[in-house]
Image: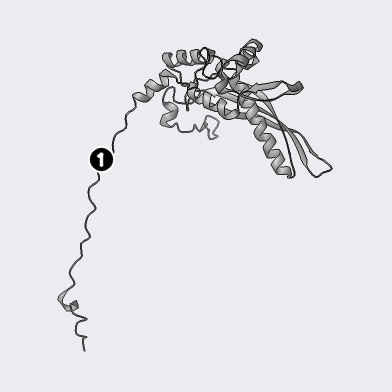
């Protein structure tokens, strides 16, 4: 109660868990070790070779080189570590939902995705998806998936060459035409971050202690009056 006679109220603070009170325990505030950071920087500077890329027909008969969505995720896991990065949808907006005379739905969706590393470094970018389907719900779903995948790949490539930024280099694309799979000078076919491998090697797992054998059930002997049938009935 304060001096005016009115009861005073103080804000209630939520209880802190041990993870909140521990330093650098929240994702986005966990610093990379110096050797991890250096290894990540070196990997990101390397350009992608043919074994990491896919092609599809483009406009005017020119093939289009790109990184598939699953490959971008795989490379991010190998470079940053499976628990070293995350992605989140910041915004997703349908641009149009139209129905054609043939009963098919055409949908266009814009998405913004943010990719964050465990130390708080992040990039975000916009992606677009289009889909057609006889069912309206399926058309919307497919367009959203394509938009999110596109936005995530575009955000990842902002981290460096090894995640797709090299594909905006026309000189690199020209060299790829005559390059062979596994050729030296590009990101290796099997990406390995030495810092992650060293950390895995230090992890040990304890074998569970052997459990004692289960106790054998014990039975109490019935009283003599119950052996061989019920006892005499009192008169």
Residue located 51% across and 18% down the image: 182
- What is the total number of numbered labels drawn onto the structure image? 1
| Residue 161 place in picture, x, y as percent | 57, 15
Furthest residue to the right?
A: 101
134 or 23: nearer the eye?
A: 134
123 or 42: nearer the eye?
A: 42
Q: Is residue 51 left or right of residue 32?
A: right
Q: Is residue 172 visible?
A: yes
Residue 194 versus residue 19 in the image, above or below: above
Residue ID for mark 1:
209
Residue 108 versus residue 170 in the image, above or below: below
| Residue 156 place in picture, x, y as percent | 58, 22
**Label 1 element class:** loop
Q: Quadrant of residue 123?
A: top right
Residue located 18% across and 77% down the image: 227
171 or 213: nearer the eye?
A: 171
| Residue 98 place in picture, x, y as percent | 80, 38
* Mark 1 nearby-residue class (10 Å; few <14, some 14–19, many ≥20): few
Residue located 44% across and 22% down the image: 24
Residue 218 versus residue 194 in the image, above or below: below
Q: Is residue 160 visible?
A: no
Q: Is residue 212 left or right of residue 153?
A: left
Furthest residue to the top?
A: 171
Furthest residue to the bottom?
A: 235
Residue 42 versus residue 147 in the image, above or below: above
Furthest residue to the left?
A: 224
33 or 220: nearer the eye?
A: 33
């Amino acid at each position: 109660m304060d001096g005016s006679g009115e009861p005073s109220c103080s804000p209630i603070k939520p209880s802190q868990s041990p993870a909140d009170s521990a330093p650098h325990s929240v994702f986005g505030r966990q610093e990379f070790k110096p050797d991890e950071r250096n290894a990540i920087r070196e990997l990101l500077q390397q350009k992608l070779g043919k074994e990491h890329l896919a092609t599809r027909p483009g406009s005017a008969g020119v093939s289009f080189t790109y990184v598939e969505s699953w490959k971008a995720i795989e490379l991010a896991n190998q470079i940053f570590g499976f628990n070293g990065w995350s992605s989140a949808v910041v915004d997703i907006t349908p641009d149009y939902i139209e129905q054609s005379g043939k009963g098919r739905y055409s949908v266009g969706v814009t998405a913004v995705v943010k990719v964050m590393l465990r130390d708080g470094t992040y990039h975000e970018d916009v992606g677009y998806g289009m889909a057609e389907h006889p069912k309206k719900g399926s058309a919307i779903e497919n367009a959203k998936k394509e938009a999110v995948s596109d936005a995530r790949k575009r955000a990842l490539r902002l981290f460096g060459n090894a995640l797709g930024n090299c594909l905006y280099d026309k000189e690199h694309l020209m060299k790829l035409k005559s390059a062979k799979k596994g050729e030296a000078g590009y990101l290796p076919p099997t990406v390995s971050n030495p810092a992650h491998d060293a950390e895995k090697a230090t992890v040990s797992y304890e074998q569970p202690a052997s459990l004692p054998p289960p106790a054998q059930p014990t039975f109490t002997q019935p009283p003599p009056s119950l052996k061989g049938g019920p006892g005499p009935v009192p008169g």
